[in-house]
Image (cartoon, helix red, strand yellow):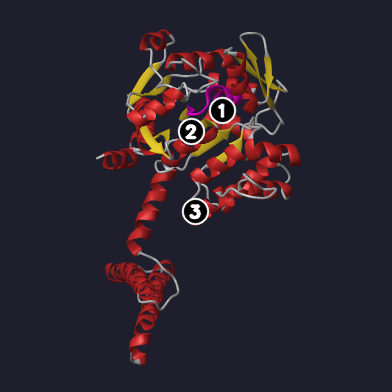
Amino acid sequence: MKIVDWLRPGIKVKRWILLGFMGVLFIAFGMIEFVNRRFYSIYYISFYVFLIVSGVFILYISVIQGMRSIIALINKGYLNVSIDSKKLENLIYEKRLLIKGPKIVAIGGGTGLSTMLRGLKYYTSNITAIVTVADDGGGSGDLREDLGMLPPGDIRNCILALADTEPIMEELLQYRFKEGKLKNQSFGNLFLAAMDGVSKNFEEAVQKMSSVLAVTGKVIPVTLDNIVLKARLENGTIVEGESNIPEEVIKNGSKIERVFIDPYNAKALSEAVEAIEEADAIILGPGSLYTSVIPNILVKDIANALKKTSALRIYVSNIMTQRGETDGFNAADHVKAIFKHASGKIIDYVVVNIGNIEKTLAGKYKEEASNLVEINKDTLKELNVNVIEGKFISYKNGFIRHNSEKLASILIETIMDKKLLSDRKKIIEYFYLSERLKEKNK
C-alpha cells in the first residue's frame, strides 16, 4: 500500500473539519456585519443572508461527510475501534425508544421475577425491581448468617436479568463453587457481599453493582431491616424462616394460614415507595406466593402505597402450584391470599397461563404433587379482578418457566391499552413503542 493511500482517509477528515470551520466563519461574518452595519439595503441584506445560508449549508455538508470519513477510518482498521454503523444507529434508536417506555415497578423475588425482567427490559428502561430480602436458605442464607448482611441471591438474579453485559460475565457471576468451604456459593453473591463491605449500606452496594453491570432501570431491596419471615399454619404451628416454611407445611400436613415478618414494622426504602407512586403499572410476581411475593407487601409502606396508587396493578399468576405453599390453589386463591395479607384490594388484572405442558414433564410434576394452576373466573369476577389469558410456557433444564418474551409482550400491550392510551398526551409518545411491539409479535 502506498503511503498516500494510507493517509488519504485521515486527510479527508481534516479537509471536512477545515470546511466546517469555514462554514462557521461565513455564519459569524454574516451575522456580525448585519448587526454592526447601520445602513441597510436590499443588496446588503441579500448578501448577508447568502453568507449565513451558505455557512449553514457548508457546515451541514462538512459534518455529514466528516462522520462518513471517520466511519471509513474505523471500518478500514485505521482506528482501533470496532463499530458497525448500522448497529450503532439501531442502538441509539433503541435507547431513545426505551427511555420513552412506561414506568413499571416489578415486585417479588426468586427466579420468576428475574425471568420476567429479562423480557421487560426490551420494551422500557423505566423499570424498578423491588425485591424481597426474606430469603434465608442456600448460599444467601450462609452469607446472611456469617456476615450479617441482607440475602443477596434474589437481588443478584434481578441485577443480571436487567444487565447489559457479556454472556461470559453473566456465566462468571452465576458460577457456583463445587468444592471447599465455598461449595454451592455463587460468585455473584460474593461479589455483592464484597461490595457491601466497601459501601455505607446494602442499598448502596446494590447501586454500585448495578452501575458496574450497566443495569437497565433500578434494582432495590424492599427494606434494609433484617427481617425474618414466619408462618402460622392452620393447626396453630408457628414456623420461623423462609426456607423452613414449605418443609414444615408438608411435615405437619397443614396449610399456611398466614405469613408475617419480624420486625412487623420494617420500614420500606423511600425510593421504593416513590417508584410505586410514580409508576404507570405495578406488576406482582411471578414467584413463590408466600415466600417471594407476599413478604414484600408485609412491609406496611409498600402495601399502603399499592392501595393509593393510580397505576395499573397486575398480578402474574404462577403456571404450576407449589408443594408446601399453594397445594390445590387456583388463580383466584392466589389473589385472595394477596388481598388478605395486604388488607385490601391491590390487584386490577391477573395474568394466567392457558397453555398445556408436555406429557413427560406433566408426569414429573404430578409425582411432586404440582399441577397446572386453574383460573376460576367466577371468583375473580366477584373479586373485581379482570383476567388476561395467554400461553406462556417455556422449558429450561427440565423445569417449567414463563416465556419471558411472550409474558413481557402481553404485559406491555395491556399497560399501553388500559393505562397509557387513555392519556392523550402519551399517545404520540408511545406510538413508536407500540409499533415496535407489533413488529416483534409478527
Residue 147: name its quadrant.
top right
Q: Secondary structure at mark 1?
A: helix
Tag 1 residue: 292
Residue 131 in percent (x, y) is at 58, 33
Q: Which quadrant of the figure contains the N terminus?
A: bottom left
What residue sits right under mark 2 in the picture?
112
Quarter of the image for the C terminus: give it. Answer: top left
Residue 34, horizontal then vertical, whole percent: 39, 68
Corner quadrant of residue 375: top left
Q: Is residue 21 magenta?
A: no
State the CA–CA distance, disc 2 to disc 3. Answer: 21 Å
**286 drawn magenta:** yes
Q: Which residue is mark 3?
A: 165
Q: Amino acid at mark 2?
A: Gly
On the rendered structure, is 294 left or right of 420? right
Nearer to us in this view, 30 or 324? 324
Q: Is residue 224 left or right of residue 412?
A: right
Q: Residue type at mark 3?
A: Thr
